[in-house]
Image (cartoon, helix red, strand yellow):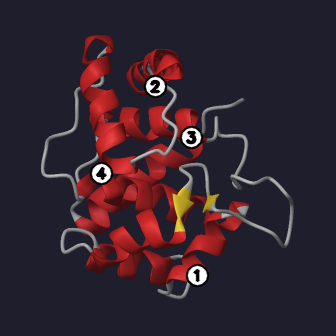
Amino acid sequence: MSIPYAGLIEPVLAHLAVRHGVRAGPAAGAMLVAIGLQESNFALRDQRDAGPPVLGPATGFWQFERAGGVRGVMTHPASAAIARAVAAEEGILFEEDAIWHSFGKPVGDRLACAFARLLLLTDPRPLPHALPEAEEEAWDCYVRNWRPGKPHRHRWASAWGMACRAVLAPA
């Protein structure tokens, strides 16, 4: 397992900050790393892992469901306009099915990462600080926003610790 922080998450966060005014920084980065580790371990883009052409029910490193997170980001007042713009920048039709399918392939990684950040943007609460002692607050943020059907709390401590180290490590 390789954490795609420098090659994927950090550049997407920087792009969202510069082009769309979405706050970047260690807090956002840590949440994206921890959630990616929790949801897919950055190993699978398909929850079913049945291979093409069967996908689902969730896709992408952040495991978005079509009628859940994808639709939520596409329609929430805090994220809809940015989601539309980012989909256009990535050359993906702004349509639930097209976006959800793109997340199941490497070509959709940037858009999936942007949608993960935008889903966090819909939460009125501030992001937890990227510090080991914020683990419980980070868990609450994850559960509140991802609404996992079968949350695995026992894996979160490790994911959060790795996320904090990844974003706070000197470049």
Give the CA distance from mark 4 to mark 1.
21 Å
Residue 53 position within the rendered picture, expressed as x and y whole percent measured from the top left: 84, 73
Q: Which mark is residue 39?
A: 3
Relative to 68, is 85 above or below? below
Relative to 28, is 110 above or below? below
- Determine whether the residue tagged by mark 4 lies in a helix, strand or loop: helix
Q: Which mark is residue 19?
A: none
Q: Amino acid at mark 2?
A: Ala
- Left or right: residue 79 compared with residue 9: left
Q: Amino acid at mark 3?
A: Glu
- Determine whether the residue tagged by mark 2 lies in a helix, strand or loop: helix
Q: Residues at badges 2 and 3 in contact (C-beta under 8 Å)?
A: no
For label 4, the residue is 120
- Determine whether the residue tagged by mark 1 lies in a helix, strand or loop: helix
- Which sits earlier in the primary sequence, circle 2 or circle 4? 4
Give the CA distance from mark 4 to mark 3.
15 Å
Give the CA distance from mark 2 to mark 3.
13 Å
For label 1, the residue is 97
- Looking at the image, the residue that sits furthest to the top is 133
- Looking at the image, the residue that sits furthest to the front is 149
Q: Which residue is located at x 24 percent, y 56 percent?
A: 121
- Which sits earlier in the primary sequence, circle 2 or circle 3? 3
Q: Amino acid at mark 4?
A: Leu
Q: Which mark is residue 163?
A: 2
Density class for disc 2 (Cα within 10 Å; few <14, some 14-19, many ≥20) is many
